[in-house]
Image (cartoon, rainbow, N blue to C red):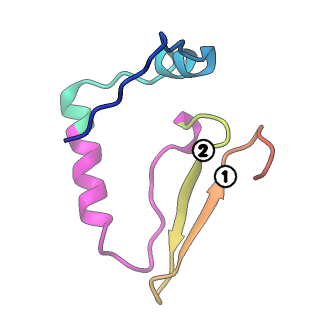
Amino acid sequence: MFRIFARKRVQMDQGIIMGFRSRIKLDPEEYTRRMNVREKDYERKGFSPKDAVGELAPGTVYLDRVDEKWRRFYKRTENTPKL
């Protein structure tokens, strides 16, 4: 177990606060359904996830597809500079 101590009061960045407030709220059943789909897809090859990319925040990197050789291909959502 780790602990972090700060000598001064830590101020939260407004971007972090806005990120928390902009999260999508799901009921437990929908969350469980989505997690079950991800668990089933974890060891598959030759597939593309069916998740809604429109729900992701700008600049989020997401899995686009996995080919037959288990290579994973990623994409980034729009409206952000590339790293």
Above or below, 67 relative to 56: below
Above or below, 51 relative to 21: below
Above or below, 55 relative to 9: below
- SS for callout 2: loop
From the viewer's side, name the closer residue of 43 and 50.
Answer: 43
Q: Where does the N terminus fall, quadrant-wise? A: top left
From the viewer's side, name the closer residue of 10 and 70.
Answer: 10
**Amino acid marked by disc 2:** Thr
Numbered circle sitting on residue 76: 1
x then y, percent, for residue 34: 29, 45
Please, which residue is most extreme toward the bottom here?
Answer: 69
x then y, percent, for residue 33: 23, 43
Task: Residue at 31% x, 65% y: name it.
Answer: 41
x then y, percent, for residue 57: 59, 34
Span shown in magenta? 32-55
Numbered circle sitting on residue 60: 2
- Category of crowding for the residue at label 2, using alpha-carbon neighbours closer than 10 angstroms: few (below 14), some (14–19), many (at least 20): few
- Category of crowding for the residue at label 1, using alpha-carbon neighbours closer than 10 angstroms: few (below 14), some (14–19), many (at least 20): some
Taking the image as shown, residue 33 lies to the left or right of residue 48, namely: left
- In the image, residue 40 lies in the stretch drawn in magenta: yes
Locate residue 7: give its quadrant: top left
Separation of disc 1 and disc 2 at Cα?
Answer: 6 Å
Taking the image as shown, residue 10 lies to the left or right of residue 13, namely: left
**Which badge, 1 or 2, comes first in the chain's sequence?**
2
Numbered circle sitting on residue 65: none
